[in-house]
Amino acid sequence: MAHILSLDLGTSHIGVAVYTDGGGTFSLNELAFDDKFQLVDKITTLIEEYSISVVVVGDMGKHKLPRLFNFVLQRLQDKTSVTVSIIPEHLSTKQVEKNNGSHSQAAVEILTDYLGSV
């Protein structure tokens, strides 16, 4: 199976989780960012570090990602060979925050939902 990067989008932090064949699913430190270019660079570094071929992004039910994230995802596709998949988030962030979790734990939930659907 492909190596997969999952993102839980926030306004100043992004939750991150990874799936690899040998390591299973695990969360990474949240990515803080000041601007969209910095965020693209940080995610690109993770894509290279973990040999990612698919990026999964949780859609918060609005069926349209904010412009910032549309820009970031388009740049990632232009700079790398990743496939981007947007899936319903099913309130993963709210569920995890309710249990004092992080955005990265929400990214694990998004990734688990994605893996269950492929």
Image (cartoon, rainbow, N blue to C red):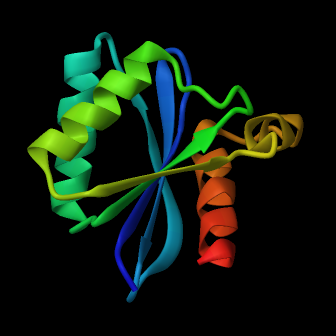
* Residue 27: % across, % down: 52, 57
Residue in the picture at 66% in, 67% down: 112
65 in relation to 94, above or below? above
* Residue 86: % across, % down: 53, 47
Residue that sits furthest to the top in the current view: 34
Considering depth in this image, is 104 or 109 the residue closer to the camera? 109
80 in relation to 49, above or below? above
Considering depth in this image, is 71 or 94 the residue closer to the camera? 71
Label count reads 0
* Residue 85: % across, % down: 47, 54
Residue in the picture at 68% in, 76% down: 116
Q: Which of the 4 image quadrants contains residue 94?
A: top right
54 in relation to 33, above or below? below
* Residue 20: % across, % down: 39, 78
Image position of 26 (left or right of 40) = right
In which quadrant is the N terminus drawn? bottom left
Residue in the picture at 14% in, 51% down: 80
Image position of 35 (left or right of 108) = left
36 in relation to 30, above or below? above
Image position of 115 (left or right of 116) = left
In which quadrant is the C terminus drawn? bottom right
Residue that sits furthest to the front in the current view: 63
Q: Which of the 4 image quadrants contains residue 34?
A: top left
Residue that sits furthest to the left in the current view: 79
Q: Which of the 4 image quadrants contains residue 8?
A: top right
Image position of 18 (left or right of 94) = left
